[in-house]
Image (tube, rainbow, N blue to C red):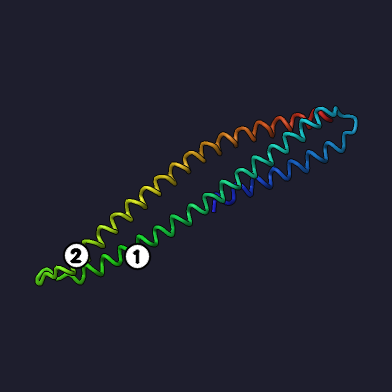
Amino acid sequence: MKIRALPAGLFILLLVLCATAQDRVQVAPQTNSQEKTEAVRIMDELQQDLANLEKSQQAYQQAAQQMATLSGGLSKKIDEVGKLSANVDPARPNPESAARLQSAIKQLMDMNQSFNMQYLGLQQQMQDESRRFTLLSNIMKTKHDTAKNSISNLR
């Protein structure tokens, strides 16, 4: 929920800044056109950066859904192995039941390994995205401050 609120908050902040910037640009008609152009360019870049962040969020939501699906499959396989193990009686060994149990345990181990590898990949993606987000956040702050100063200079 926090991941979803962050881009929405940034988007609202960007809209407020754009509206404020446009109001200020319209209030000061005797301003330098080069500063106006620079401020508009920076606002456009900020909007593009925000759009990129929203795309990243959507990609993570899809990855989280895939992980949930894999986790559900793993849980089902665990239940299956549990049922098969209940059917194996150590007092009266049945080679067929034991073979099914061993096969199910091997499949479970394979699924678990696959799940762990995909989970590790998702963790690495999230760390990379976190680094990119921090970098982008710092860049957006700098651009915002530059646009704010340009707008202040337009007065």
Task: Tell me what residue is drawn at x 52 percent, y 53 percent.
Answer: 61
Mark 2, Cα crowd under 10 Å, few <14 / some 14-19 / many 20+, is: few
Residue 44 is left or right of residue 116, and the answer is right
Point out residue 102 in the picture as x, y percentages from the top left corner: 21, 61
Q: Residue type at mark 2: give it.
A: Ala
28 and 78: which is toward the camera:
78
Gap in angstroms between the C-alphas marked 2 and 1: 19 Å
What residue did someone put label 1 on?
76
The mark total stands at 2
Residue 11 marker: none
- Give the foreground label among 2 and 1: 2
99 and 105: which is toward the camera:
99
What residue did someone put label 2 on?
99
Mark 1, Cα crowd under 10 Å, few <14 / some 14-19 / many 20+, is: few
Task: Tell me what residue is drawn at x 83 percent, y 36 percent.
Answer: 25
Task: Tell me what residue is drawn at x 80 percent, y 32 percent.
Answer: 37
Q: Quadrant of the C terminus?
A: top right
Q: Residue type at mark 1: give it.
A: Lys
Q: Earlier in the sequence, mark 2 or mark 1?
A: 1
Query: Which quadrant of the structure image shows residue 22?
Result: top right
Point out residue 3 in the picture as x, y percentages from the top left corner: 55, 49
